[in-house]
């Protein structure tokens, strides 16, 4: 797993059902088993934070209605709880690991054949990061792999 399970990652996983454009988008990213665990993660976070303050309660309602603007408030408050309650933090992290284990990997490859002086670009975007590559070839030399 590449991402540490921070409060930000936990909240991001838990609210996907609300803030993503629909169940079809989730199905492209996660297995059915992982999707089934997301509401459980959200409910644990919500149960722990609900009643802490009016601002937190408002943020929870906003997230459930799909409003991303409340993510920071929930994340900051969850971060405090994770520090104060290591057992709860461990429960959430184990649940999040189960969800992330069900993430569908894109193992596709891309092939491009260019000839003469053609220049081609291929882009693969994962999680908002675009990986763009370029090969520089000097006349008479082969590219280094």
Image: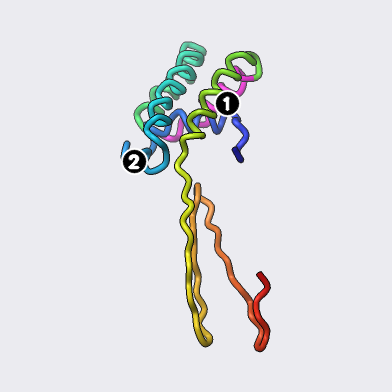
- Distance from disc 2 to disc 1, alpha carbons, whole Å, reads 24 Å
The nearer-to-camera label among 2 and 1 is: 2
Is 80 on the left or on the right of 21, as rendered? Answer: right
Residue 55 on image: x %, y %: 48, 20
Q: Which residue is mark 2?
A: 21
Residue 91 on image: x %, y %: 56, 18
Q: Residue at position x 48%, y 60% from top?
A: 109
Give the answer, above or below, for where 3 lies relative to 93: below
Q: Residues within 10 Å of mark 2 (few under 14, many from 20)?
A: few
* Colour scheme of the picture: rainbow
* Residue 125 image label: none
Q: Residues within 10 Å of mark 1 (few under 14, many from 20)?
A: some
Q: Residue at position x 66%, y 69% from top?
A: 145
Is 8 on the left or on the right of 142, as rendered? Answer: left
Q: Are marks 2 and 1 in contact (CB under 8 Å)?
A: no
Q: Is residue 95 visible?
A: yes
Q: The N terminus appears in which quarter of the rendering?
A: top right
Q: Which residue is mark 1?
A: 76
Q: Which range of residues does the magenta coloring cover?
A: 67-82
Magenta-drawn stretch contains 69 = yes
Which is more toward the observer, 98 or 84?
Answer: 98
């Amino acid at each position: 797993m590449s991402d540490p399970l921070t409060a930000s990652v936990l909240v991001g996983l838990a609210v996907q059902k609300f803030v993503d454009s629909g169940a079809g988008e989730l199905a492209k990213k996660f297995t059915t088993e992982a999707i089934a665990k997301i509401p459980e993660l959200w409910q644990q976070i919500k149960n722990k934070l609900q009643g802490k303050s009016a601002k937190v309660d408002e943020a929870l309602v906003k997230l459930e209605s799909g409003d991303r603007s409340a993510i920071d408030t929930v994340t900051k408050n969850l971060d405090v709880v994770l520090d104060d309650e290591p057992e709860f933090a461990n429960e959430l992290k184990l649940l999040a690991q189960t969800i992330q284990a069900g993430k569908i990997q894109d193992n596709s490859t891309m092939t491009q054949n260019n000839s003469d002086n053609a220049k081609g670009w291929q882009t693969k975007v994962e999680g908002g990061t675009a990986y763009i590559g370029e090969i520089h070839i000097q006349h008479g030399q082969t590219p280094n792999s």
